[in-house]
Amino acid sequence: MRGFGGLLLVLVIGAIARFAVWIIARRAIEDDLIGGHHIRRGTTVVIPIHHIHHDPRWWPDPETFDPTRFCPPDKDRPRSAYLPFGGGRRICIGQSFALMEMVLRAAIMSQRFTFDLAPDYPVELEATVGRGSGSTPRCWPPTSTTNTTCGGCKRIPVAESPPGS
């Protein structure tokens, strides 16, 4: 991918990732003290990624979808303020492949289709919690035009109109 279109696509995917990840859970392998709180060995610690990705200290106007906030990168924003694939020793080993796949799929789809919301379609945010790749069914990509659910989440079939239309 060359030129501004390729860069814009990468920026859009980065901005989407800021909204897509809600939490990451880790199990304490030994007793620890974090922010004055005693964490016992074996305790599951939940890291609120969505909260970190919407912290106004690092993300001005945090609820706004703005891909341009990634270009140029904000040098004052700590690396730990953007963690769509986790961080540190436990960062997702498939991060590079996942990003490449997202860019390629989006590029191919944008060459073949024009995407737009149906008029007056309500957009609602829904959080799901899983334990990693494959453990929680996702709504994307749709598996058929007649399937109304994908493992517990509700979705409008591709062939139907949105409610109220």
Image (cartoon, grey):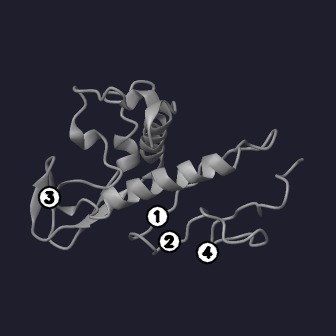
Q: Closer to the camera: disc 4 or disc 3?
A: 4
Callout 1 amino acid:
Val
Q: Which label belongs to residue 129?
A: 1
The percent coordinates of residue 100 (x first, y second) are: 40, 55
Callout 4 amino acid:
Gly
The percent coordinates of residue 126 (x first, y second) are: 58, 54
Alpha-carbon span between mark 3 and mark 2: 31 Å
Residue at the image point whose x is 14% and y is 58% from the top = 38
Residue at the image point whose x is 39% and y is 71% from the top = 131
Q: Closer to the camera: disc 1 or disc 3?
A: 1
**Badge 1 element:** loop
Circle 2/circle 4 CB separation < 8 Å: yes
- For disc 3, the marked residue is 38
Callout 3 amino acid:
His
Alpha-carbon span between mark 4 and mark 3: 37 Å
- Vertical arrangement, residue 36 with respect to residue 148, above or below: above
* Other residues around mark 2 within 10 Å, as few (<14) / some (14–19) / many (≥20): some
Circle 1/circle 2 CB separation < 8 Å: yes
- For disc 2, the marked residue is 136
* Other residues around mark 4 within 10 Å, as few (<14) / some (14–19) / many (≥20): few
Q: Closer to the camera: disc 1 or disc 2?
A: 2
**Badge 2 element:** loop
- For disc 4, the marked residue is 151
Q: Quadrant of residue 160?
A: bottom right
Q: Closer to the camera: disc 3 or disc 2?
A: 2
